[in-house]
């Protein structure tokens, strides 16, 4: 028998989760996607100990970048698979929706939109 060996179950799950994140990014409207600048989106298993997070934006929002913003490391959006998978309780569609919501939420922070504003506009 030829071909590549099967991926271990945990590696296959990680790949499937990363695909959900990629799919969410692909769903961004073109005008929003084109405005994203100097930001990397990553997936990690769990948030830092004691932190109850689904995702985290770390960086300088676009609206706060001044004329001297250059040569800096990319902002980072981290999506935490563990909490999202547990929230979905085995429901693939629920997981897809929550990953999409979390990715969009963290991208909003990249654009400088606060949690408070997201609540105001009913997008939290």
Image: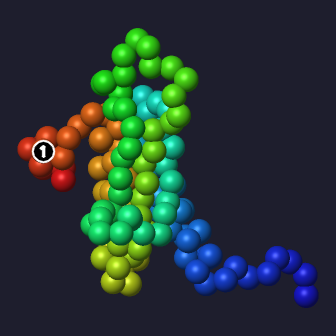
Residue density around tag 1, few if under 14, some if 14–19, many if 20 or more, within 10 Å: few
Query: For this rendering, which residue is in front, 27 or 53?
Result: 53
In the orientation shown, which residue stands out farthest toward the bottom? 1
Residue 38: percent from left, percent from top: 50, 32
In the orientation shown, which residue stands out farthest toward the left? 120
In the orientation shown, which residue stands out farthest toward the top? 67
Left or right, 24 with reference to 12: left
Q: Is residue 55 above or below residue 8?
A: above
In the orientation shown, which residue stands out farthest toward the right? 1
Q: How are the residues colored?
A: rainbow
Can residue 104 be seen at all in this image of the molecule?
Answer: no
Residue 59: percent from left, percent from top: 39, 38
What residue is rendered at 23% in x and 37% in y?
A: 113
What residue is rendered at 18% in x and 53% in y?
A: 124
What residue is rendered at 61% in x and 76% in y?
A: 12
Can residue 80 be seen at all in this image of the molecule?
Answer: yes
Which quadrant of the figure has residue 36? top left
Which quadrant of the figure has residue 87? bottom left
Residue matched to label 1: 116
Which quadrant of the figure has residue 118? top left
Question: What number of labels is visible?
Answer: 1
Residue 56: percent from left, percent from top: 35, 53
Secondary structure beneath label 1: helix
């Amino acid at each position: 028998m030829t071909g590549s060996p099967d991926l271990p179950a945990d590696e296959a799950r990680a790949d499937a989760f990363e695909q959900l994140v990629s799919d969410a990014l692909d769903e961004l409207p073109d005008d929003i996607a084109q405005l994203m600048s100097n930001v990397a989106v990553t997936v990690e298993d769990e948030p830092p100990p004691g932190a109850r997070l689904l995702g985290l934006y770390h960086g300088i929002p676009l609206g706060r970048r001044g004329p001297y913003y250059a040569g800096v490391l990319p902002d980072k959006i981290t999506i935490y698979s563990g909490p999202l998978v547990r929230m979905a309780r085995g429901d693939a569609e629920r997981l897809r929706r929550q990953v999409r919501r979390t990715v969009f939420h963290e991208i909003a922070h990249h654009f400088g939109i606060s949690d408070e504003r997201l609540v105001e506009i009913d997008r939290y």
